[in-house]
Image (cartoon, rainbow, N blue to C red):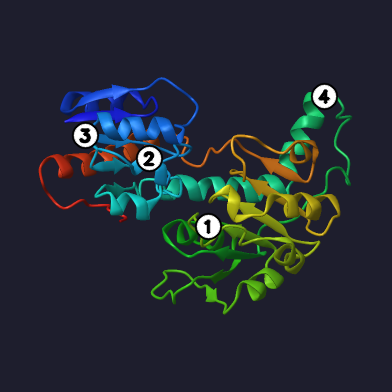
C-alpha cells in the first residue's frame, strides 16, 4: 500500500510505518493547500495528514486513488468529512493517545496564567528583578478555585480530574449531552452562560468545526468577567480572537492561556504584546512518546484498512 505521510514523525514511528508500507514522509512545516491535497488523493492509496492540511471539498474531486485519510491527531476539522464520505473516502483519527498530554498542557496554562509565570520569567531575563518583595507579581491562587470545563469528553474529563484531585478545585462543566459515572465530584450546568458566570477558570475542551466556531465571543467573555481566566487547548477558532483581544485589553477578563489560535500559525501582534495572556506554540501533545503513540494509533487504522478489517477510529 502506497502511503503518504505529510510531515516528519518520530524515528520510532517512521521506522514502524516504513517497515509495513511503501511510505513517503514529507519534510515540510507548512500544511497542504487544497490543490496539494487533491494531488495526494490521486497518487496514493492512503494519506496520513495532520493539522493544517486543507482537505476541503475541492480535494475530493476527480479520479481518486486514495480511500483512507488516517489523520494524525484527535481533531479533524481541517478535513471536510461530508465531502470525504461522498467520495467514498474513510477518515480516522487518534483519540485516547492525545488525552493525558493535552490535559497536562491545560493545567500548565492555568498555573502559568494565574501565577503570572511567563511575565515573571520575562522580567527576570531582562535583568529587571531586584529581589523578593511582598507585593511583586501578585497573581491568583489556583487551589480551591472553581474551574468550568466546556466540553466533558475524554480530554475535558482528564482536565477536570487533575483540577479536582491535584488542586481541590470545584468542577463545573457544560456538555451537549448528559455525563454520568464520573469518578470525581462535578456538577453539570444547563447552559454555557451559567458556567462562565460561576467559573474562576473556564477551559475550552470541545472539538473544533462549524458547530463550535466562535462559541466564545464578546458576550461569553463578558459573562466570564474581570476576575476570571479563559484557557483554550482545543481549536483556535472556537474563540473569536478579536473579541478576546478586546476583552483582555479592556480588563473585561483577568487573563487567558492559549495553546491554539484562530489563524494559526499566525498569532495576533496584540496578543504577543500583552502580559495578561500566556501563549504556547500548540504544545498540547508535544512529548516524543505521545507523538509516537499517535502515529501508532493512526497505523492501527492503516493496517485495518489494508487488511480489510473495520476501522477502529473511523469518524465518517
The secondary structure type at the circle numbered 4 is loop
Circles 4 and 3 in contact, beta carbons < 8 Å: no
Q: Which residue is mark 4?
A: 126
In three-dimensional space, the C-alpha distance between marks 4 and 2, rounded to whole angstroms, equals 48 Å
Decide which of tag 2 and tag 3 comes sooner along the chain: 3
Where disc 1 sits, the SS reads loop
Local secondary structure at mark 2: helix
Of callouts 4 and 2, the N-terminal one:
2
Name the residue that disc number 2 marks: 59
Return the x and y of residue 61 as percentages of the image width and height.
Answer: 33, 42
Tag on residue 45? 3
Asked if residue 294 lies left or right of residue 146, the reply is left
User: Sequence order check: which comes first, mark 1 or mark 4?
Assistant: 4
Q: Nearer the viewer, residue 233 or 104?
A: 233
In terms of image quadrants, where is residue 263?
Answer: top right
- Give percent across and percent down for residue 134: 88, 45
Figure check: 210 above or below 34: below
Q: Nearer the viewer, mark 1 or mark 2?
A: 2
Q: Residue furthest top?
A: 27
User: Which residue is drawn at the image coordinates 40% and 48% (left, top)?
Assistant: 74
**Which of the marked residues, 4 or 3, is nearer the chain's N terminus?**
3
Crowding at mark 1 (Cα within 10 Å: few <14, some 14-19, many 20+): many
Which residue position is annotated with label 1? 205
Amino acid at each position: 500500500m502506497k502511503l503518504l505521510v505529510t510531515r516528519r514523525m518520530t524515528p520510532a514511528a517512521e521506522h514502524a510505518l516504513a517497515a509495513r508500507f511503501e511510505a513517503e514522509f514529507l519534510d515540510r512545516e507548512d500544511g497542504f493547500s487544497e490543490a496539494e491535497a487533491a494531488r495526494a488523493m490521486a497518487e496514493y492509496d492512503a494519506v496520513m495528514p495532520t493539522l493544517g492540511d486543507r482537505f476541503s471539498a475541492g480535494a475530493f474531486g476527480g479520479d481518486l486513488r486514495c480511500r483512507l485519510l488516517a489523520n494524525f491527531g484527535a481533531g479533524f476539522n481541517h478535513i471536510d468529512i461530508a465531502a470525504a464520505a461522498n467520495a467514498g473516502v474513510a477518515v480516522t483519527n487518534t483519540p485516547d493517545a492525545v488525552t493525558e498530554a493535552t490535559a497536562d498542557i491545560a493545567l500548565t496554562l492555568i498555573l502559568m496564567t494565574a501565577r503570572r509565570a511567563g511575565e515573571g520569567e520575562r522580567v527576570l531575563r531582562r535583568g529587571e528583578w531586584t529581589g523578593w518583595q511582598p507585593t511583586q507579581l501578585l497573581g491568583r491562587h489556583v487551589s480551591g478555585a472553581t474551574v468550568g470545563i466546556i466540553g466533558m469528553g475524554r480530554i475535558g474529563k482528564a482536565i477536570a480530574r487533575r483540577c479536582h484531585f491535584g488542586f481541590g478545585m470545584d468542577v463545573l462543566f457544560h456538555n451537549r449531552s448528559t455525563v454520568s459515572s464520573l469518578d470525581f465530584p462535578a456538577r453539570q450546568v444547563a447552559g454555557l452562560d451559567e458556567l462562565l458566570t460561576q467559573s474562576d477558570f473556564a477551559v475550552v475542551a470541545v472539538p473544533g468545526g462549524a458547530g463550535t466556531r466562535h462559541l466564545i465571543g464578546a458576550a461569553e467573555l463578558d459573562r466570564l468577567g474581570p476576575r476570571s481566566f479563559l484557557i483554550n487547548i482545543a481549536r483556535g477558532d472556537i474563540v473569536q480572537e478579536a473579541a478576546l483581544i478586546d476583552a483582555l485589553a479592556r480588563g473585561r477578563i483577568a487573563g487567558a492561556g492559549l495553546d491554539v489560535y484562530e489563524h494559526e500559525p499566525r498569532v495576533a501582534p496584540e496578543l504577543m504584546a500583552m502580559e495578561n495572556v500566556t501563549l504556547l506554540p500548540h504544545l498540547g501533545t508535544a512529548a516524543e512518546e505521545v507523538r509516537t503513540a499517535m502515529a501508532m494509533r493512526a497505523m492501527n487504522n492503516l493496517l485495518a484498512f489494508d487488511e480489510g478489517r473495520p476501522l477502529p477510529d473511523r469518524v465518517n
